[in-house]
Image (tube, grey):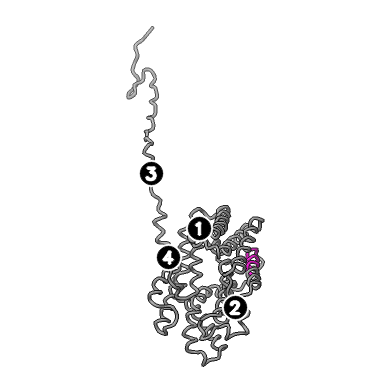
Amino acid sequence: MDLLRFLAALAVVLFHFTGFGGAGPWPDPARELFPALAPVTRYGYLGVDLFFVISGFVILMSVWGRGPGEFGISRVVRLMPAYWVGVLFGGIVYAVFKLGNGVPGLVIPNLTMLQGGLGEKNVDPVYWTLWVELHFYFLIGILAVAGITYRNCLVFMTVWMLGGVFADEAGSKLLQVMLVPTWSPYFIAGMALFLMHKFGQTLLLWGYVAASWLLAMYWSSWRTGHVFKGADETVVSVVVTVIFAVMYLVATGRLKHLRWHRLTVLGALTYPLYLTHSTIALPLLENLYPELDRWTALAVVIAASLALAYAIQRLVERPGQKWMRRKLYESLKPLEETPPARLDPRERIVPPPAPAERPQPVGVASDGPPVPQPYRP
């Protein structure tokens, strides 16, 4: 899973640096500068699709057996330290080089990670995926309140999938925003694959995966207006199918032999690499290219992106997550206190009956020696 996450992030990096056809960190479109790589890397944006399937798998795995409070803390601790650094780094790049979107008026709402809902631009364009992820976390939090069980997961996936289709049919803006039908099939597929991993393959779970795959194909390649300009629909369909197939192999343990302790390092670099690679490329390419040839400049920005990601992971994420986790769990302690039991006021407290006195034998005083009785013939 760590390897897949890193490959997804690397695909997005190569897409932005060599396959993107619009305005980017290079003075000219990256696709024109790297015509030999562009036919492949132009599809690197589909790394986001892989991210979302992995997220559905991993998030359900992480929330299993936890309550909503623990789940919320795990997500805040995982996301926010590196994200705050990424936003502030964007603000620094703008303040020093006047590049990017890191103006103070955008940095402030971006620090909340709610800029997507506020209608504000992202400091870095890649942050749009985090807003989609937050939709998923919100829905999973509701599921955690109800209880994470096999049955509840099936009900949740059914309601989410059909609700997204109904929202699209009705043209309901509110439901489309809440249920994100464009991306929900990937998360639902990841959840179904985790259940397959945990409980075994069943026809029902295969049905969820198959339905999610068909909906993902529809939104990614068949729906008019939802395909990147110039992308080949057949290639997109093949890549999406490969993503589902690889995740199936992961869920069923067929890739468990791919184990190397360094893969965890790559997995740890994924998130900060994704957050900062576009921002750091702006000042570097502004000052290095065209003095350096495009291949050397490309190598420099990729190396710098990896180095910055490593520094953020080591110097910010590790200590920041440890501190935040401790403090946030302390904030949940009042919830663990059990209040004293309250009696129903309608119930009368009746004292138990006093023990019955033993009858005294005839002629025996209760507090003294036997009393002589008169003779009766």
> Which region is colored magenta?
242-252
For residue 356, what is the image quadrant? top left
Find disc 3 in the rendering and name its residue.
Answer: 342
Cα distance in 3D space between marks 4 and 1: 17 Å
Comparing labels 4 and 2, the label whose residue is closer to the camera: 2
What is the three-letter code of the residue carrying label 3? Arg
Find disc 1 in the rendering and name its residue.
Answer: 66
- Residue 326's mark? 4
What SS does tag 1 mark? Answer: loop
Quadrant into which the N terminus falls: bottom right
Task: Please give the name of the residue rendered at 39% of the width and 56% of the height, measured from the top-left corner.
Answer: 334
Q: Is residue 37 above or below residue 107?
A: below
Question: x, y percentage for residue 177?
Answer: 49, 62
Question: x, y percentage for residue 284?
Answer: 48, 86
Cα distance in 3D space between marks 3 and 2: 65 Å
Find disc 2 in the rendering and name its residue.
Answer: 42
- First in sequence, mark 3 or 4: give its number: 4
Task: Please give the name of the residue rendered at 41% of the width and 81% of the height, measured from the top-left corner.
Answer: 94
Magenta portion: prevailing SS class: helix
| 245 part of magenta stretch | yes
